[in-house]
Image (tube, rainbow, N blue to C red):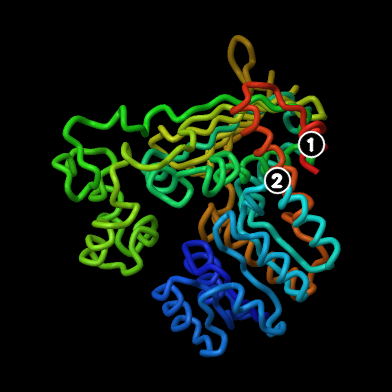
Amino acid sequence: MLKLAVVGAGNRGRDIYANFILNSTEEAEIVAVAEPNEIKRELMSIEHNIPEENIFDSWEKLLSKDKFCDGIILATGDDMHFEPMEMAMKKGYHILLEKPMSNRVQECIQIVEMAEKYKVKVMVCHVLRYTPFFSKLKELIDSGVIGDVVDIQHNENIGNFHFAHSFVRGNWRNSNETSPLILQKSCHDLDILSWLLNGSPAVKIASFGELSHFTRENAPKNSAERCLDCSLIDSCIYSPKKIYYNNVGKWPTLVASDIQTPGELTKALTHNQYGRCVYKCDNNVVDNMVTIINFKNGVNVTFNLCAFTDEVCRTIKIMGTKGEIRGNDAKNNIEVYRFGQGEGRFCNGAVEVITPEILVGGHGGGDTGLMNDFIDLCLDRKSDSRTDPRTSLESHIMAFAAEESRVSGKVVYLNDFIEKNK
């Protein structure tokens, strides 16, 4: 039985990873928790029957003890990864690290070096590599069915309500306090692009984007500072009635209130960040961003990241010398077109429609695949994983470089960027 501690009992630490261990495996158990929020800490301790001596209100207290379990699920804020990582690795803990590894490029590089120095097993939570959808895309590319890949168009459609919750009102609204949008939200996507291209490194990046809509200048006339005080609460696109009250007991309401009842939600929204008008927050992250990436193998990628979508999904078009692949992960649909093998005047591509298998769990089953892989790794059933820190570093470097390009207005060459940040 693998014994694990959870550091950070929030949406990912408790609701996803710890709940998987509680409900979906008999090979691991949660034996400790470190969480400053008293309500979340108590819920974790009750759900997992954690003994009193293993319940902590800070990661410092947990890691001050001699090693007492096998591994740690580290799901603190982006800016709170490095120090607990370093201490946990020195003590010999295996670590499942929520992405991004850090919101500082130098710390990401150091985490890779420390993991290799202390020889502990570390996995970064790039869950898309474990989804049947993206695994099938990689299988198709590697099979050569569309020839050599020439160009990829990839879109992360964040969804208007998701963006308002997480990146306007929520924890990742201000890059000065946490992370740039492309790092926090889309190191997933940059990682999956690198994986689909068999790890070919990026050579140069250009990026463009801005905060265009969620500003005070765009606030509706007569809108209030807080939603529950606003006369527009019934008509506003981003009304808490539409985002939170309809989802009590589920995400994103799980984040907006510690206690999941309508009455407690109302109490929370009267004073916390999720009750604020989306046009009157302290947010500064971009709400739209386009990134162009040139890879060493010659493939060019355009990556579009946007708040203003109806669906929350990823769509992709992969263009090769012999055909084309189109996919939508929310619809779990992949279409393969083979040039010159169809019917009609120009013998356009013959179409094959593929529906990947469906796995239970968030991120299209990726959370399930990730957790099973971490358990197998820690139980020595395998020697490596798809998401070790050295592999994951590539996506982080691309994200930091893209943000530098966006801010500076210049094309960023990756070798120069890495050398500058060593």
Callout 1 amino acid: Lys
Q: Is residue 324 visible?
A: no
Question: Residue at coordinates 52% horizontally, 86% vertically from top-left?
Answer: 50
User: Of callouts 2 and 1, which one flags the residue occurring earlier in the amino acid sequence?
Assistant: 2
- Vertically, is 327 above or below 34? above
- Vertically, is 52 above or below 326? below
SS assignment at label 1: helix
User: Residue 206's quadrant in the figure?
Assistant: top right
Q: Which residue is mark 2?
A: 105
Residue 337 is situated, as x and y percent measured from the top left of the image, at 64, 27
Question: Residue at coordinates 78% horizontally, 29% vertically from top-left?
Answer: 203
Q: CA distance from mark 2 to mark 1?
A: 11 Å
Q: Is residue 62 visible?
A: yes
**Which quarter of the rendering shows the C terminus?**
top right
Residue 354 is situated, as x and y percent measured from the top left of the image, at 59, 41
Callout 2 amino acid: Val
Q: Which mark is residue 420?
A: 1
Question: Residue at coordinates 80% horizontally, 67% vertically from top-left?
Answer: 382
Q: Dot 2, how many residues are within 10 Å of its Cα: few (below 14), some (14-19), or many (20+)?
A: some
Judged from this view, the residue extending furthest toward the top is 345
**Which quarter of the rendering shows the N terminus?**
bottom right
